[in-house]
Amino acid sequence: MAEIRIVDQTMAVLIKSLDLRAQKQQVIAANIANAETPGYAARKFTFEDDLRKAIDNPEPVRRTGNAKHIPLGANGISGVQGRIVKQRDTNPLGDGNSVSLDDEMFDLAENELLFEAGSQMLKKKLSMLKYAVSDGR
């Protein structure tokens, strides 16, 4: 018998993307909050390339020898975690703070727009599922 799955790959990507965008929001907020802190190194949260690789090259689902065993490690889309990279201040005359408020505000606006678009797409997918379950009513 075929396995019935309610969440397809598109929904899984949207859900993971929203989770990662929420994490990116926290990193951006921390950068903005520390814009005046001497010696603070700005952080960038990146996950887009890793997510794209997971979509393009899905790993096979790991099976265990027994149904009660827990598979080790996450694979595929659910395994994407993202990376935080510190940006050091290269200006010798500065206070060591590498936060650019202009860059952070741009990243904040971009992340907000992409989060909103992803949430609207997920909402549409869920409403289509609801429509199918309710026999088109």
Image: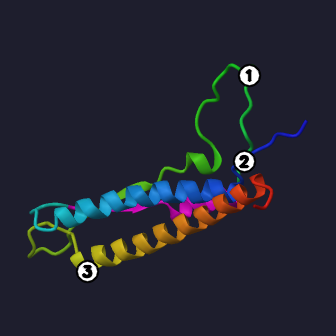
Q: Which residue is mark 1?
A: 67
Report helix, strand or loop for mark 2.
loop
Helix, strand or loop under label 3: helix
17 horizontally vs 33: left or right: right
Look at the image and tell me whether residue 24 can be seen: yes
Q: Residue at x 57, y 46 (%)?
A: 79
Q: Whole-Å distance between the Cαs marked 2 and 1?
A: 21 Å
Horizontally, residue 110 falls left or right of residue 16, namely: left
Magenta span of residues: 41-57
Return the x and y of residue 36 as percentages of the image width and height: 10, 67
Residue 19 placement (x, y as % from top left): 47, 54
Would you name the residue on which mark 3 appears?
Answer: 102
Q: Is residue 56 covered in magenta? A: yes
- Looking at the rendered image, the quarter that the C terminus falls into is bottom right
Which residue is most to the right? 1
Residue 107 x/y as whole percent: 36, 73
Q: Disc 3 marks which amino acid?
A: Asp
Residue topped by disc 2? 6
User: What is the crowding at mark 1: few (fewer than 14 residues within 10 Å), some, or many (at least 20)?
Assistant: few
Which of the two discs, 2 and 1, sits closer to the camera?
2
Q: Quadrant of the N terminus?
A: top right
Asked if residue 28 lies left or right of residue 50, the reply is: left
